[in-house]
Image (cartoon, helix red, strand yellow):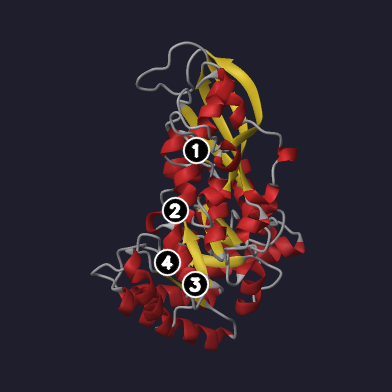
Amino acid sequence: MRAADIDGFYSDASTLDAEAHLILDYRIECSGDPRVAAAHLCSEQSTAQWRRVDVDEDYRPRFAAKVLDLEVETELSGTSYPLRPPVEGPVSVCRVRIAHPHANFGPRIPNLLSAILGEGPFFAPDVPLIKLLDIQFPDSFLAAFEGPQFGLVGLRERWQIHNRPFFFGVIKPNIGLDPEPFAELGYQGWLGGLDIAKDDEMLADPDWSPIARRSALLGAARQRAEQETGERKVYLANITDEVDRLLPLQDLVVANGANAVMVNALPTGLSAVRMLRKQAQVPLVAHFPLIAASSRLPYFGVHTRVWTKLQRLAGFDVVIMPGFGPRMMTAEDEVLECIAACVEPMGPIKPCLPVPGGSDSAVTLPGVHEHVGNADFGFVPGRGVFSHPMGPRGGAASLRQAWEAIAAGIPLAEHAAQHPELAAAIGAFE
């Protein structure tokens, strides 16, 4: 790119129409002049060739993504990761904030992703390593999206869960049981105090546990549990499948008594979820397969908070995400950033319920509550309920008892002296 062309990919925020642009925050490692590399990054994700040969025209004012800020943080002798072919010479580590005109792709998630995470930015000249760290949407873009149908506040009203976390339970063993014993485990969990008993993200419609039979049994068990406990209960059915089966499966499981459905967001596709949201009869819950595959490396890919925002935009009422603790290999600050992305102001888009999860039990509930700082979260043990020494009824009861201790401001061990289910959880999972 000639020096005279570079300035066309730079702008001052005060000169741009903020409502006409998305704001993208990238971390890049670049060879050569960082200013040229950042211009390439903008060019490749928007205009590319911005005029025809021998024609006096310039598409950049209307279509170009433009650098608003460029900060060189440090210089390295090579890239953070070994690449093929290797990058020779010094490498600059930069933060780049870019304004991208959203009219280039419109309010269409596949086209948005093709621009900001596609061939352009990830094959830009002189930018061998890149990670999209954040995205901000103007209200003019958000206005075209429905977002969550119920959202955090609507779920509390719909399920009558107030002043405490939402207690989920992943029925275990996760994919190996026939529908009858599987449904009995969910039923026992509900009797013990679970709000939501859910299919595992890998349990969809296999031969040994057909979703038609499984959802019918769990739907009936949920209704019995509601009658016996006097509380609202939720069966969360996993309908992850080929796109053309999503609507028929939703209709099937809802008719059978499921009152929420789960979709593995990225394997199925956010556009498919948006389609489902337009006809959703019940709350939509996201699970996170594929997200770690694109986000785990700190200097390449896309930050999990971006996926969280996009899942909320697509219409999920609940976003299950990698949680705290070593099992999920996710830094505490990253989990908190994803939780914030669920609930922070986002134009007309409702807040959704964040559910940080991974190897939880009654023992870890105080720590999760302390990290989050309030009760607006879902808590989703699997083994912590269904491998509890006193069975799923005891495991679910231990969650309620742990919350009683937290609400009363007393240590778990002290409360456990009068509550054998909590005591058993401490003995098994501490």
Q: Could you say whether the residue bearing mark 4 is in a helix, strand or loop? A: loop
What amino acid is at disc 2? Pro
Distance Cα–Cα, label 1 vs label 2? 18 Å
Disc 3 crowd, CA 10 A, few/some/many (<14, 14-19, 20+):
some
What amino acid is at disc 4? Ile
On screen, residue 43 above or below 338: above
Distance Cα–Cα, label 3 vs label 4? 29 Å
Q: Residue at x 52, y 53 (%)?
A: 321
First in residue order: circle 2 vs circle 4? 2
Closer to the observer: label 3 or label 4? 3
Which of the 4 image quarters holds residue 27?
top right
Residue 266 visible in the shown view: yes
- The answer to the question of whether label 3 and label 1 lie on touching residues, with beta carbons closer than 8 A, is no
- The answer to the question of whether label 1 and label 4 lie on touching residues, with beta carbons closer than 8 A, is no
Closer to the observer: label 1 or label 4? 1
First in residue order: circle 1 vs circle 4? 1
On screen, residue 311 above or below 90: below
Disc 1 crowd, CA 10 A, few/some/many (<14, 14-19, 20+):
many
Residue 204 visible in the shown view: no
Q: Which residue is drawn at 54% across and 42% down?
A: 303
Tag of residue 152? none
Tag of residue 110? 2
Q: Which residue is drawn at 48% across and 32% down?
A: 55
Q: Could you say whether the residue bearing mark 3 is in a helix, strand or loop? A: helix
Tag of residue 278? 3
Residue of label 4: 171
Which of the 4 image quarters holds residue 354?
bottom right
On screen, residue 61 above or below 221: above
Closer to the observer: label 1 or label 2? 1
Residue of label 1: 47
